[in-house]
Image (tube, grey):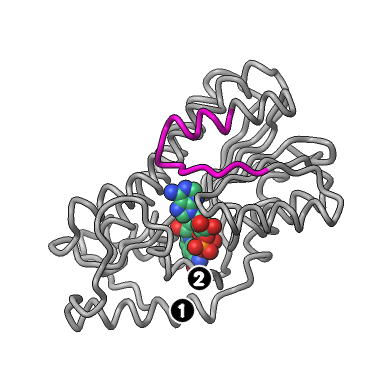
């Protein structure tokens, strides 16, 4: 998909961070927007700011982990614009704990937003995108944690690995049908957002008590906070996404050294080595 002007983009997790930056980039390219986020106040502010800059934008408060709410988002979008050309299933949350401390509520929350948020969107939007017959593209935001296995991030790693394989399978499903819809998976490394404060929007299970983390997990969490704070600007991730969509690339990385970690992991697998620890 090379032309964006006048086309319709739907972005989840669009109130702030990477999703907001994708919305800004889409608006700058002349796209019409439907923005979704669980944080109604920030979503309204973002939608209003984009409109003030001239964008044709609507927002709908949506918890992507709830299939019915994502169906409502699709209904609003198709009623408003009739078509969707770019779907960016980006909403995500992080939970930093080793697997033995990850509660059923943690799993429900993280898988609900990160994995089912993506699958709910694909189910709600793709049939009508395909039936529309237009060229289009779907992007899901995974993470380098979808290709590597970070310590003390059991649920996050699992959810993002699941997103990568869902999108790889989707690519095959679309290609086998000769579809005009392309697929990509965005695997950011550290981006300066509020991802480390994900529990501000927690919709399932009980809140984490940071003081309950063991010293090893607490150290990992501290390193993640620092890495995110020193990360690239969300606008850089958004530009990487649009470059990949226009070039029809599937795996979308945000950092030059991303592939080194992937190579090390696959060399571990092919060489029967124990997993190399990812240094944060
Ligand atoms: N920031 C990073 O370093 C980084 C790295 C790799 C992957 N990612 C991924 O990028 C995506 C965007 O995260 P970000 O870094 O911009 O973080 P962020 O916290 O700044 O933004 C996430 C957005 O998702 C929204 N959200 C949370 N739960 C939701 C729900 N149930 N339904 C709808 N919206 C919901 C939040 O309100 C927020 O606006 C996530 O999928 C995240 O896992 C981020």
| Residue that protrudes farthest toward the right in the picture | 54
**Residue to which mark 2 is pinned:** 190
Residue 172 drawn above or below residue 47 = above
Name the residue rendered at 70%, 59% in the picture.
239
**Badge 1 residue CB within 8 Å of ligand 1:** yes
Q: Is residue 194 visible?
A: yes
Q: Please state the horizontal and vertical placement of residue 208, each as a whole percent of the image.
A: 26, 67
Can you tell me whether the CB of the residue at mark 2 lies under 8 Å from the nearest atom of ligand 1?
Answer: yes
Q: Nearer the viewer, residue 248 or 35?
A: 35
What span is in magenta? 59-74
Can residue 259 be seen here? The reply is no
Query: Which mark, residue 57?
Result: none
Task: Tell me which corner region of the image, top left, top right, bottom left or bottom right, holds residue 168.
Answer: top left
Please tell me how crowded label 2 is: few (under 14), some (14-19), or many (20+) other residues with Cα within 10 Å: many
From this view, report whether residue 31 is shown above or below residue 110. above
Residue hosting label 1: 227
Queried whether the magenta region covers residue 223, the answer comes back as no
- Do labels 1 and 2 touch, CB within 8 Å? yes
Query: Does residue 142 sit above or below 191 in this rendering?
Result: above
User: Number of marks in the image?
Assistant: 2
Which residue is pictured at 59% across the width and 37% down the height?
Answer: 138
Q: Look at the image and tell me in which quarter the N terminus lies.
A: top right
């Amino acid at each position: 998909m090379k032309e964006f002007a006048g086309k319709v983009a739907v972005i989840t997790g669009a109130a702030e961070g990477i999703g907001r930056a994708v919305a800004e980039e889409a608006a700058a390219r002349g796209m019409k927007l439907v923005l979704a986020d669980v944080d109604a106040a920030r979503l309204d502010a973002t939608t209003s700011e984009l409109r003030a800059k001239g964008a044709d934008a609507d927002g709908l408060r949506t918890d992507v982990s709830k299939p019915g709410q994502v169906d409502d988002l699709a209904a609003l979008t198709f009623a408003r614009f009739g078509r969707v050309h770019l779907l960016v299933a980006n909403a995500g949350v992080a939970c930093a704990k080793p697997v033995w401390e990850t509660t059923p509520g943690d799993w429900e929350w993280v898988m609900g937003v990160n994995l089912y948020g993506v699958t709910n969107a694909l189910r709600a939007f793709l049939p009508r995108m395909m039936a529309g017959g237009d060229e289009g593209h779907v992007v899901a935001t995974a993470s380098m944690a979808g290709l590597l296995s970070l310590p003390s991030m059991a649920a996050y790693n699992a959810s993002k690995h699941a997103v990568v394989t869902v999108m790889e399978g989707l690519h095959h499903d679309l290609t086998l049908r000769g579809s005009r819809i392309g697929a990509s998976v965005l695997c950011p490394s550290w981006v300066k957002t509020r991802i480390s404060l994900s529990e501000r929007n927690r919709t399932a299970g009980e809140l984490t008590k940071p003081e309950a983390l063991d010293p090893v997990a607490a150290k990992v969490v501290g390193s993640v906070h620092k890495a995110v704070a020193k990360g690239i600007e969300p606008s850089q991730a958004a530009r990487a996404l649009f470059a990949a969509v226009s070039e029809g690339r599937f795996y979308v990385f945000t950092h030059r050294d991303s592939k080194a970690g992937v190579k090390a992991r696959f060399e571990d697998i092919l060489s029967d080595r124990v997993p190399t620890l990812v240094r944060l």
